[in-house]
């Protein structure tokens, strides 16, 4: 250990003894510990932290970490049908090329001069999302869909001056946990029932639960369970009739072929951008968006940074900056709207690159491809004895519930078998919804080939029909 | 011939490509990427796929995204990247409070391996033992570094971790039936704005303690602020001034005696690793920003992790799931009795967790302490040098040393010359530097905050100081020159007047075209 301590670590240049000595001399102290004079003795940590021995050589570190990571089994060597809030889509090479650039990767809070590129790339992200969503205001990304939904709801509360939100009970249960925590104790969360046959929102229940306290109605499209909620116009008109807002969480990947929620009356639209050119990263690829119309009463309730375009002192030059900065907690602390900080900007830039590459035709073709492949998968799985796919009698996008109740096997048994054939089966819904015991949520995207889907169908058939 | 090394100031000019907005590059028919084909058998089996959609759900007109070939898209974003000054390029001392340290490239390579990027967060535990091991071990490292007992990596940044702290405080008193009565959170003006703002999200009334003459919040003020309504304290130490509050244990004791919970905002703990800990200061909760102290890159503002730690007493309130180890297998535990639920989807930003793990493994205990020590050395070296610059000062704690950063002031410069901090930041850009003002409100007039970390060499630090000195000298000689800066940056003086005007602000290109009556090409 002693020998290690004498080696200057490559990350700490001024650890070099001569440099360190000259700086201490300049400051006028003999020992670095004199600089900690304000920390009382009883607060000083005695001895050395109990951490594993250091691996200061880059090679040793690499081998150590790679050895641990090699214990992972990935969606590259296995065929993955898990979705449920994080999705395997194809990530174009250019997306990775851009988000690994040091200029973007290691930037942070630069001014719109030396960081003009950060501001422009995120303004373009907002703009590209605006086209997809058919809305004029989109935020610099927040953490994820959990946060985007939570903030959308709190925005609705402030805009309407009301303190209750009605939420479709087919929302992702994990997202609901985040929403409930974020709303508590300021906004009450009440659930609206769904039709057990179609999955669609029960409009009678919605009407019955509407009151003068209702700030808004929140639902997801496609829903967490994959079906398409096509009563959007009815839901938004019920909300509006009661002075409430309509809030929709949407999968942006679907918007090449499915109409954006703003077109059926949604006032605030949110969701996740992970599917737009960002790897799953074990759930680390999430990024949340929130979008509204360009009305002051909406814009002023965003907590997020909103980058806007403007001009400079030189004719023909675009400049950028923060729109309505005074609404943020950066400007006015607790008087601001919720809070702002470090969220998911690099994923915003990446999603912008993705949408630039895809263009209108790419998004249309992507949506169509996912519809075709997921329908094919539903058909193939539905042909297996005892299996119902999809469970809900509605059109679906990308995800669908597979009902294994009549197979005599549990989802966990089935998934264990599938893993042996290098397949990650769908998410077990048994614990999440009482009515969905032994049902699983399957996700099929453009990355799945016919061969992949056929392999899944064959494996299930072999296991369930033998 | 050659470069004049006598002057530490570079003859700098940032890249300037005059790059259009992406929509202006669109040419009908161009494609940037093609997606996988649908096999003929699938097409024969299910048809076009979209006829199943109800008519009212079909998008009639494709989204008006630009149509651009692949290389042109690449070039556009590469050019924009050159319009951006990451920490890998500049001597990034000027973004104080944000700990702009070196993010090692090896960690980046590891974080981009398929064993990280191609993992789905719902994979069965036996297929993700490597990921769970990293998460669990980083938890144990942070327990040691903080002295607290359990960490979660769910919060997506510092502000999210503060929200989690406030949520745990709320849940703790809710369980005790005291949530309604205990409705106040105390913080200090030199703690991060989110310590106040996130508390309000949880319905708390915020009491902010202001600094005394020594720059620190006063014990007497805290005594007056606490009551049976106190739910907790959310505080930074050292505060944004870089001054360590030596009375911090008195603070936590006073709040504990009032029945409150003490939350330590350690977003930036870079000066005190291995030196002093949350435990000894008697905090109940703390958090570290892995994208600051623990070296994960800032990514233009995330993705990030606010690693949140608690004492044994508060373990049951953490968001679910937490990673456990039974001696053989790592697994997820959802069974926490008083959990606040979720703060974010899944387990947090795994690549950030991995980079922090690798950084700690590279340095070890002695290395962490050396990083902290050198960060403090660098900071005090800069303190001495900046105080020598005409027009600059370091308010509070005269004659004393600081920890990892200092909040300085250009007040004298502004009074003497009319040149403000904002003007100085613009002029610094002309020399390839970034300088930030500070969080609002500007308690320190004309503030700027410098935090050197351990990453920059003495020569680089000297170069940065020369930049500050040069701008100050210019301000006294020719203030207009500074006020009209920048000249060598990507763009010139920005007209901010439209950004606060609802009739003119434009947050998307489509809004800009409409509001400024520009014709779409």
Image (cartoon, rainbow, N blue to C red):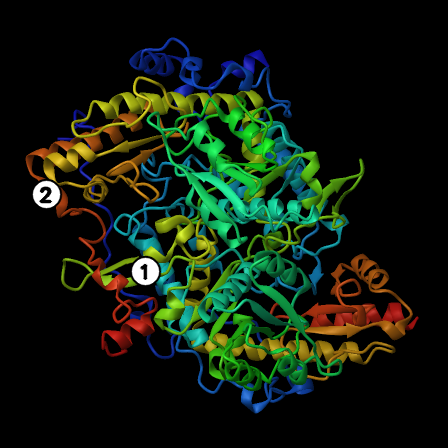
Question: In this rendering, is residue A303 above or below B426?
Answer: below
Question: In the rendered structure, the residue with mark 2 lies on which chain?
Answer: B
Specify the farthest residue to the top.
A30
Q: Residue at x 39, y 28 (%)?
A: B216
Residue A153, x across and y down, in percent: 53, 66
Question: In this rendering, is residue B280 above or below B309?
Answer: above
Question: In the rendered structure, the residue with mark 1 lies on which chain?
Answer: A
User: Which corner quadrant holds the C terminus of chain A?
Assistant: bottom right
Q: Circle 2 sits in a helix, a strand or a loop, which is it? A: helix
Residue A193, x across and y down, in percent: 70, 77
In depth, the one of A269 and B100 nearer the eye is A269
User: Which corner quadrant holds the N terminus of chain A?
Assistant: top right
- Within 10 Å of disc 1 (Cα), the crowding (few <14, some 14-19, many 20+) is many
Question: In this rendering, is residue A11 above or below A265?
Answer: above
Q: Residue at x 87, y 77 (%)?
A: A386
In depth, the one of B365 and A31 nearer the eye is A31
Residue B250, x across and y down, in percent: 52, 25
- Nearer the observer: mark 1 or 2; the answer is 1
The residue indicated by pointer 2 is B481
- How far apart are the two marked residues, 1 and 2, measured between alpha carbons? 28 Å
The residue indicated by pointer 1 is A324
């Amino acid at each position: 250990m002693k020998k290690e301590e004498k080696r200057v670590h490559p990350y700490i240049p001024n650890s070099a003894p001569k440099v360190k000595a000259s700086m201490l001399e300049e400051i006028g102290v003999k020992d670095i510990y004199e600089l900690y004079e304000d920390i009382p003795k009883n607060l000083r940590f005695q001895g050395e932290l109990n951490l594993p021995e250091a691996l200061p050589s880059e090679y040793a570190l690499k081998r150590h970490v790679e050895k641990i990571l090699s214990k992972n089994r990935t969606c590259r060597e296995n065929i993955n049908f898990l979705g449920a809030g994080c999705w395997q889509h194809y990530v174009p090479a250019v997306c990775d090329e851009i988000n690994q650039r040091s200029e973007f990767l290691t930037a942070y809070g630069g001014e719109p001069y030396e960081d003009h590129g950060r501001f422009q790339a995120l303004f373009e992200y907002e703009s590209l999302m605006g086209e997809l969503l058919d809305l004029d205001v989109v935020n610099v990304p927040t953490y994820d869909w959990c946060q985007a939904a939570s903030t959308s709801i709190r925005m609705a509360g402030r805009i309407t001056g009301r303190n209750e939100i009605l939420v479709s009970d087919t929302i992702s249960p994990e997202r609901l946990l985040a929403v409930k925590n974020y709303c508590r104790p300021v906004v009450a969360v009440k659930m609206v029932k769904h039709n057990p046959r179609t999955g669609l929102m029960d409009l009678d229940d919605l009407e019955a639960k509407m009151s003068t306290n209702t700030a808004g109605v929140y639902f997801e499209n496609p829903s967490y369970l994959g079906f398409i909620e096509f009563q959007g116009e009815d839901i938004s008109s019920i909300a509006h009739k009661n002075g409430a807002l309509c809030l929709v969480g949407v999968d942006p990947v679907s918007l090449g072929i499915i109409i954006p929620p703003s077109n059926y009356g949604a006032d605030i639209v949110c969701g996740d951008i992970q599917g737009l050119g960002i790897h799953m990263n074990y759930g680390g690829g999430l990024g949340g968006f929130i979008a509204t119309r360009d009305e002051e009463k909406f814009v002023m309730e965003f907590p997020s940074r909103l980058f806007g375009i403007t001009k400079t002192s030189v004719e023909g030059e675009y400049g950028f900056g923060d729109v309505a900065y005074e609404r943020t907690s950066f400007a006015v602390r607790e008087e601001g709207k919720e809070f702002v900080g470090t969220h998911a900007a690099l994923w915003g830039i990446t999603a912008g690159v993705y949408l630039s590459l895809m263009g209108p035709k790419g998004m249309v073709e992507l949506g169509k491809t996912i519809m075709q492949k997921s329908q094919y998968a539903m058909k193939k799985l539905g042909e297996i004895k005892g299996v119902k796919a999809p469970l809900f009698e509605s059109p679906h996008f990308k995800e669908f519930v597979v009902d294994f109740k009549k197979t005599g096997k549990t989802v966990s048994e089935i998934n264990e078998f599938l893993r042996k054939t290098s397949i990650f089966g769908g998410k077990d819904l048994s614990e999440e919804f009482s009515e969905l015991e032994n049902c699983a949520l399957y996700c099929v995207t453009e990355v799945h080939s016919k061969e992949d889907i056929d392999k899944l169908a064959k494996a299930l058939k072999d296991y369930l029909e033998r | 011939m050659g470069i004049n090394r006598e002057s530490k100031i570079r003859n700098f000019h940032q890249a300037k490509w005059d790059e259009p907005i992406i929509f202006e590059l669109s040419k009908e028919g161009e494609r940037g990427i093609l997606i996988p084909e649908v096999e003929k058998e699938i097409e024969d089996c299910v048809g076009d796929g979209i006829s199943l959609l109800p008519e009212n759900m079909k998008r009639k007109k494709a989204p008006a995204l630009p149509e651009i070939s692949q290389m042109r898209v690449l070039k556009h974003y590469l050019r924009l990247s050159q319009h951006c000054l990451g920490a890998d390029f500049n001597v990034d001392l000027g973004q104080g409070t944000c700990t702009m340290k070196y993010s090692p490239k090896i960690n980046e390579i590891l974080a981009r391996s398929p064993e990280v990027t191609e993992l789905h967060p719902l994979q069965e535990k036996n297929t993700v033992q490597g990921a769970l091991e990293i998460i669990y071990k980083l938890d144990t490292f942070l327990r040691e570094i903080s002295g607290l007992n359990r960490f979660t990596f769910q919060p997506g940044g510092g502000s999210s971790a503060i929200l989690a702290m406030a949520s745990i405080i709320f849940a703790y008193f809710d369980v005790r039936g005291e949530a309604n009565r205990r409705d106040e959170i105390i913080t200090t003006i030199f703690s991060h704005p989110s310590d106040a703002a996130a508390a309000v999200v949880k319905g708390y009334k915020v009491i902010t303690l202001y600094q005394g003459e020594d720059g620190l919040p006063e014990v007497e003020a805290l005594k007056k602020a606490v009551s049976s309504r106190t739910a907790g304290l959310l505080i930074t130490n050292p505060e944004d001034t870089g001054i360590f509050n030596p009375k911090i244990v008195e603070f936590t004791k006073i709040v504990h005696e009032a029945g409150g919970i003490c939350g330590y905002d350690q977003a930036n703990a870079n000066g005190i690793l291995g030196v002093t800990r949350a435990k000894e200061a008697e905090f109940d909760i703390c958090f570290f920003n892995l994208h600051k102290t623990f070296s994960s890159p800032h990514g233009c503002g995330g993705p990030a992790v606010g690693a949140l730690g608690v004492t044994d007493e508060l373990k049951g309130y953490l968001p679910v799931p937490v990673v456990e180890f039974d001696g053989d297998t790592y697994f997820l535990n959802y069974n926490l009795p008083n959990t606040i639920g979720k703060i974010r989807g899944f387990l947090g930003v795994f690549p950030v967790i991995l980079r922090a793990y690798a950084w700690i493994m590279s340095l070890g205990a002695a290395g962490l302490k050396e990083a902290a020590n050198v960060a403090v050395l660098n900071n005090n070296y800069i303190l001495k040098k900046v105080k020598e610059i005409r027009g600059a000062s370091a308010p509070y704690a005269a004659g004393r040393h600081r920890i990892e950063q200092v909040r300085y002031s250009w007040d004298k410069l502004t009074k003497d010359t009319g040149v403000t901090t904002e003007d100085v930041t613009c002029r610094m850009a002309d020399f390839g530097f970034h300088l930030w003002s500070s969080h609002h409100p500007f308690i320190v007039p004309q503030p700027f905050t410098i935090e050197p970390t351990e990453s920059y060499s003495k020569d680089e630090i000297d170069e940065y100081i020369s930049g500050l000195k040069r701008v100050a000298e210019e301000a006294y000689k020719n203030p207009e020159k500074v006020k009209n800066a920048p000249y060598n940056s990507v763009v010139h003086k920005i007209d901010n007047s439209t950004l606060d005007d609802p009739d003119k602000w434009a947050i998307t290109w489509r809004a800009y075209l409409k509001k400024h009556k520009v014709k779409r090409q």
